[in-house]
Image: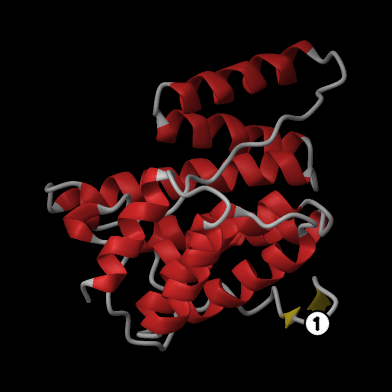
């Protein structure tokens, strides 16, 4: 079992399993009036002057910037095979897969939804590997929790969000909001509102926080 916080232990080897918790809603970009998450984030990394790796790195980041999730996933997957164990590359690969899964999930195309679960699963696996490769990079934990809650694994996401918040010296708006979204998805609306109110004390004008608090107060 990997200890990722001073008080909370999380087994990174079991978080890719489907959640048995019945989800109330699935937060994907605030669609259908559902709560919204702060976006997952890519991480920069060095390729030590290797022209081939540099080209792949540029392709990957350019694809991310253009919302070409499949292209980004291909570039970072190749980089991950060349730079085995690099947490930042694995993070970016997982991020591209996550964004592709979310895009597929939002599509009205019936065929596009066929591979959503496998895309989420692959994203979680990549981000889990990244977290194990570099437990000190807390942003990877946030991205992993985002993938978990976006795929409906809300109970496991909540644990990771709590670890992420514990690992940061300063309160994180993204982490508090993610924790609130997970709690709300588990039906724990009072706790969700408390987490959001704590975040709003830091930034009372943040549109995501304000919008989510309004949603929770009407449920």
Residue where numbered disc 1 is placed: 7
Residue 23 position in % (x across, y down): 32, 80
The residue depicted at 42 percent of the width and 68 percent of the height is: 181
* Residue 75 lies in quadrant: top right
Is 28 on the left or on the right of 60, as rendered? Answer: left
The residue depicted at 49 percent of the width and 74 percent of the height is: 194
Residue 87 seen in the figure: yes
Q: Nearer the viewer, residue 152 or 97?
A: 152
Q: Check the image and report above or below for 96 versus 211.
A: above
The residue depicted at 57 percent of the width and 23 percent of the height is: 61
Q: Check the image and report above or below for 80 versus 172.
A: above
Q: Check the image and report above or below for 64 versus 85.
A: above
The residue depicted at 68 percent of the width and 76 percent of the height is: 13
Residue 185 position in % (x across, y down): 36, 76
Residue 27 seen in the figure: no
Location of the C terminus by quadrant is bottom left
Element class at badge 1? loop
């Amino acid at each position: 079992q990997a200890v990722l916080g001073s008080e909370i232990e999380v087994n990174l080897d079991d978080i890719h399993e489907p959640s048995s918790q019945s989800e109330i809603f699935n937060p994907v970009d605030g669609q259908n009036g559902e709560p919204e998450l702060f976006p997952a984030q890519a991480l920069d990394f060095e390729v030590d002057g290797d022209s081939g790796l540099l080209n792949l790195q540029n392709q990957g980041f350019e694809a991310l910037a253009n919302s070409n999730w499949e292209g980004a996933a291909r570039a970072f997957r190749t980089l991950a095979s060349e730079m085995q164990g690099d947490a930042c590359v694995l993070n970016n690969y997982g991020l591209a897969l996550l964004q592709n899964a979310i895009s597929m999930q939002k599509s009205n195309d019936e065929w596009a939804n066929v591979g959503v679960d496998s895309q989420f699963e692959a994203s979680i696996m990549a981000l889990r590997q990244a977290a194990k490769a570099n437990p000190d990079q807390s942003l990877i934990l946030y991205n992993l929790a985002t993938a978990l809650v976006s795929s409906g694994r809300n109970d496991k996401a909540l644990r990771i969000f709590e670890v992420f918040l514990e690992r940061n010296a300063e309160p994180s708006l993204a982490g508090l909001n993610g924790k609130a979204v997970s709690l709300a998805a588990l039906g724990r609306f009072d706790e969700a509102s408390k987490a959001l109110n704590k975040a709003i004390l830091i930034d009372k004008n943040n549109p995501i926080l304000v919008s989510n608090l309004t949603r929770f107060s009407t449920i």
